[in-house]
Image: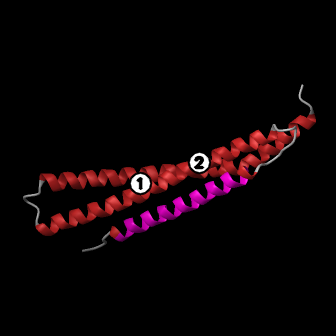
Amino acid sequence: MIGAEALNPLTEAIQLAVAPVFLLTGVAGMLNALGTRLARVIDRARQLQARLEDAQETLSASKQEAILAELKTLQQRSKLINLSTALMVICAALIGLTVMELFYSAGMAGRLQLSQWVATTFLGGFGFFITACMLYLAEILVASQSVKIGH
């Protein structure tokens, strides 16, 4: 049977692990949003490429230039989304390591002993999260600038 003194470090570790787990939930939501945006960019690029290939002789030079310009914007957007996604995945890995470190530290010497790596992986994960969010914003701004309302 486990005594109350043995449960205390585990209880502390679980309480400390709650914040990183909430961050992981946010990361999962962001990865979903990024995946959806990337899918839309890819679908639009395929549509434009097919249009350009199928009707190249019938399209005017200005129409072809407009399609090529939009394809260039879509390529820029996909690069931003891919980089943001990569940073989000690194963030998730670092936060996962943080949770593992918290549980590992609970088992050491019967009391909670946090190492410097807990702070390093948590802050590193948060740094990657913030950077990925900034890239996500940049992609949204690029997408917004490419929209032409009216004529």
What's the residue at 32%, 60% (across, down)? 74
**Residue 133 is one of the magenta-drawn residues:** yes
- Tell me: 50 left or right of 76: left
Q: What amino acid type should be assigned to the residue bearing mark 2? A: Ala
Q: In which quarter of the image is residue 80?
A: bottom left
Which of the two marks, 1 or 2, is nearer to us in this view?
Answer: 2
Q: Which residue is tagged 1?
A: 37
Q: Quadrant of residue 142?
A: bottom left
What's the residue at 66%, 50% (across, down)? 22
Query: Which segment did they paint magenta?
Result: 118-145
- Regarding mark 2 in the picture, which secondary structure is present there? helix
User: Tag on residue 92?
Assistant: 2
Outermost residue to the front: 116
Mark 1–mark 2 Cα distance, whole angstroms, equals 19 Å
What's the residue at 18%, 67% (across, down)? 65
Main SS of the magenta part reads helix
Q: Position of residue 46 (x, y in %)?
A: 26, 51
Q: Is residue 22 above or below residue 146?
A: above
